[in-house]
Image (spheres, rainbow, N blue to C red):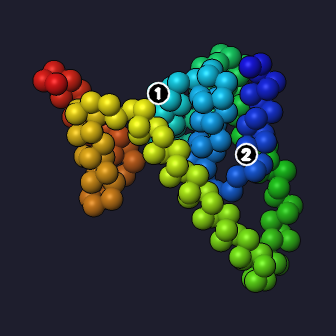
Amino acid sequence: MTLVQLVGLILLFNAMTFGNGPVMIPLLRESLVSGRGVLTTDELLYAFTVARITPGPANSYVASIGYMLFGLPGAALCAIAVVAPGVLMLPLQYGYGLLRSARAVSGFTRGLIGASVGLIFAASVEMARASLTTPGAWIVFAVAIVAATVLRWNNLLVLLVPSAIGLALSAFL
């Protein structure tokens, strides 16, 4: 894979997806992990995790992927590629504002949202299969689920506290 190919994929995937950063993960996983094998599942998860705990846009993990594969030029070009479609679509938002109450437009939007959630879920299942391979990983996963859904901790705590538990468990398991 070349840098131009990676930037092209990011432009295409970002233009095709609607929503926040995680929506591109299934497409990137399919293309970069399963398809071309230029990243591992762990590397993709690492890039996404770093983006979740750092300030900035939710899809900044794409810059991390660019950096992993092509260094600083990759990070810079991927960061530009991930925001370019949104910036170019700003003029279309006026028209969407006028049409969003139309039945067909709202139905289309609901369909996009449902499909996006389905893709994110499917990618999450695949990444879980690849990552949750030890009892310690399952314990950390369970703690993170409870922290995020029951306790409603912020993302930073959901990532850091279970990670610290995983570190402690690594001494025993």
From the image, tell me which residue sits under label 1.
Answer: 42
Split into 4 quadrants, where in the image is the N terminus?
A: top right
Residue 9, numbered label: none
Q: Residue 95: horizontal and vertical position, in percent?
A: 86, 71
Q: Earlier in the sequence, mark 2 or mark 1?
A: 2
Does 68 sit above or below residue 14?
above
Residue at 39% x, 48% y: name it.
Answer: 155
Q: Residue 71: horizontal and vertical position, in percent?
A: 65, 16
Question: Farthest residue in the top direction?
Answer: 71
Left or right of residue 163: residue 20? right
Residue at 73% x, 37% y: name it.
Answer: 10
Q: Residue 63: horizontal and vertical position, in percent?
A: 64, 30
Residue 4, visible in the rendered structure: yes
Q: Amino acid at mark 2?
A: Asn
Q: Amino acid at mark 1?
A: Asp
Residue at 68% x, 17% y: name it.
Answer: 70
Split into 4 quadrants, where in the image is the C terminus?
A: top left
Q: CA separation, marks 2 and 1?
A: 22 Å
Question: Farthest residue in the left direction?
Answer: 172
